[in-house]
Amino acid sequence: MSNPGGDNADACVPQALTDFVFDLYDSVTSSQIPEEQRTFYKTTFADLCAKYFSTSPWPSPQAIASECNGDPLFLALYREVTHRHWHSVGRPTIRDRIEGWHVYKELFDEILEDAEDGGSSASRPNFYILPEWTFDILHEFVYQFQGFCQFRHSLHNSATKHGLTLSSSNGGQIVSSKGGSASTEKDADKDDSNDAATDNKKINAPPHIVDNLTVVSQNRDAWAVESVLYYLHRLIAIGTSPKCTVPAYQYLGIFASVTLSRLECLVGDYTGCLDALSPILSSSSALQVMDEGLGGADNNSGGVQPQSAIQVVKSVFAARLSLAYHAGVSYLMLRRYKDAIRTLGEICSLHGFKTGQLRKDQIGKIYDRMIALLAILTHIAPGATGGTGTSSSSSSSSAGAVLLEDSVIRTIRDKHGSTLSKIDAGEEGYEDLFMFACPKFVLPAIPDYSKPSTPQKDNAYKQQVTKFQNEMMSQHTTRKLRSYMKLYTSIDVTKLASFNDTTTTTAAAKDEAEKQFLPTLIAYKHKMKQLECHSDEDETASSSSSPVDGKIGSALDIHYYITNNEDDTNKTSSSMVHVDEAEKQRRFENFFMGQISQNIDILKDVETMSTKV
C-alpha cells in the first residue's frame, strides 16, 4: 500500500466525487436528513469506491477542501472514511497503521473540541452522523488498535528470531547479536541512507524487519493503550451525560461503550468488559435519544419518540452482535454460565439466523462462534438451558432457568454434537471449541525491544486459552459425578467415589476414599455457584443496576446435601449424599410456535407460486 492522499490521488478529482463530497457535507452540517445521509454513506460511497478507487486511495482532504469550505471536522470525517476504505482494500504497511492512529487522533480531537466548546445545541447541532456511521468509526478504531498490537508483538518475535534488539544506551540503534548495528534516527541525507543500507547488510537480517523496527521505535506513542482508552472514556462521558441532547454525541457515547466493552474483552479484562456496558444496560440510565432517523416517529402525534440506549444499539445490527458476542465471552470466562447463555441465546434465535439471511460474511462467522460458545455452555451447565421447573427443596438450583429455542439447540447438536460426545467419552474437546469461538486476544503493552521476546508470555491468545483449559479440566469429573447423582435419591459417598474410579476395597480404603471425595462434592457445588442478572426475557443482558451486578444462584439442575450417619452397633459412621432433582416441566409452547412459523413460511411460498396453467 502506498500513502493515501498522494500526488497521484490529487492529480484529477472526478466530478462525481466533488458532487458526493458537497452533498455529504450538506447532509452532515446543514440538512441533517438521516435517510439522505444513509444513501450517501451506504450507497453512493460504495459505488464511487467500486468505480474509481477499487485499487487506489481517495484524494487527500486538501484536494476536496473547497467543497466543504475547509470545515476541519468534516475533513477529519472524510479522512477517516477514506482511510478506512484504503485500509480494507490493501495490505497495510507499518506506516499505514501509524497513519491510521493520526487519522483517528485528529478526528476525536476535533469532536471533543467541538463538544467542549459548546458549539452544538439540541436545536441546531453543528453536525449529524448516522448511528451506523458512528459505530463503523469506533469499531474500526478498536480493530486497527487490535491489528497494531498483533503486528507489534509479531515484529518483536521476528526481531528476536533474527537476533535483533534496540539499544537503549547507544542512540537508539538496532543491534544484532551476530554483530552489526543500524541507526534508527530520521535522516534524509542520501549518504546516511547508504550507510544504513550497509549496516542492514552487516546485520544480516531481512530489510523489512529492520525497517519496521526502525519505524516502530520512532513512533512509540502510536496506538498506546492509554491514549485509546482516554478517547473512548471521554466520548462516553460526553455522550452519556444527562446534559447532552445532541444525537451525534449521544451516538458516540453509546457506541464508544460498545467498542470499549470489546476492547476490554480483547485484553482479558472481563469484568471491565461488562462494566463498560453499564451506560447502556443499567436500569438507572436515563439516556434518551431524540432522532427521527431511528424510526421513532409517533404515528398519532407526528412527533419523534425518544429512544433508549439499548434501542439505539439494536438499530445497528453489527453493534448488537458485537455487544452480545463479547459480553457472552466475558460471562463465560467469569463462570456466569446462565448469563452467557441468555445473552448469546437471544441473538442466535433471531429469525434472520434461522432462515440463513444473516449468515453471511463476517456476521456468519461470528454466529458460528456464538454457537460454539453455546455448545460449551450448555454442556458444562445443562441446568441453565431450561426444561426444568421448581420444587420445594430445589428451587435455588432451577429457578430462573434459561430457555434456549429448539432451533438453537438443534443447531448446536448438528454442528458440535460429535465433539460433545467425544468429551463425554473422556476425550478433549473444550479447548478446540474455545479456540475456534474466542476473539483474537491482544497484549496492549508496548514490547521492550531492547530485550528478546518470550513467545509464551507474549502470546495473549495462548494465555487465555490456557486459562480456559485449566478451568475446564475439572468439568469431565464433575459431569461424570452429576450423571451418577441423577440416578439416585440417596447414595453412600464411598459408593459414589467408587463410581468415579476411587479404590474402596478395604475398610481403610473406604475411609480414605470418603475423605478424598467429600472435597470434590463440595467443590462441584461451589464451582457452579455464580452471579446471575435477573432480566426480562426480551432484554439483551440485564435490567439490574449494572451487567456486573447480580444475585448469587446456581447453574446446577440438581440439589444435593450430605448427612453423616452413625452406626452405634458397629461404632462406625458413613456419609450419605441425598439428591433432589428438580421436577421436569413439560413445555409445549416452543413446539407450537415452531409449527406456526413453518406454516407461515409455507403460506408465503404458496402465495408466490404461479397458478397459471
Image (cartoon, rainbow, N blue to C red):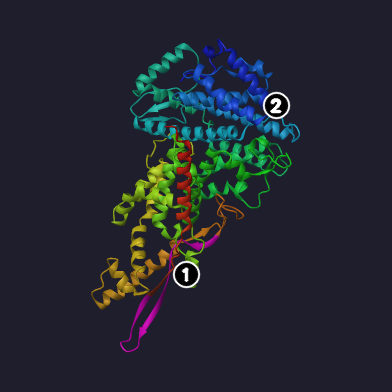
Q: Residue 160 appears at what percent x and percent y?
A: 37, 33
Relative to 284, residue 229 above or below:
above
Viewer-nearest residue: 232 or 179: 232
Which label number is shown at residue 394? Answer: 1
Left or right: 515 in relation to 335: left
Q: Mark 2 points at which residue?
A: 31
The amino acid type of the residue labelled 1 equals Ser
Helix, strand or loop at mark 2: loop
Q: In this view, does 544 lie to the left or right of 120?
A: left
Q: In this view, does 308 lie above or below 181?
A: below
Does residue 570 show up magenta in the picture? Answer: yes
Q: Which residue lies furthest to the left in this view?
A: 505
Q: Residue furthest right?
A: 123
**Looking at the figure, which quarter contains the C terminus?**
top left
The part of the chain drawn in magenta is 551-576
Going from the N terminus, do you reach mark 1 or mark 2 first? 2
- Crowding near the residue tagged with mark 1, few <14, some 14–19, many ≥20 C-alpha atoms within 10 Å: many
Q: Which residue is drawn at 64% across and 38% down?
A: 295
* Res. 93 image quadrant: top left
- Measure the C-alpha gap from mark 1 to mark 2: 61 Å
Between residues 26 and 218, which one lies in front from this camera angle?
26
Q: Residue 479 carries which label?
A: none
**Quarter of the view holding residue 518:** bottom left
Three-letter residue code for mark 2: Ser
Q: Position of residue 398 (x, y in %)?
A: 48, 64
Q: Which residue lies furthest to the top in this view?
A: 11
- Please tell me whether residue 519 belongs to the stretch shown in magenta: no
Residue at 57%, 23% in the rendered image: 44
Q: Position of residue 62 (x, y in %)?
A: 61, 16
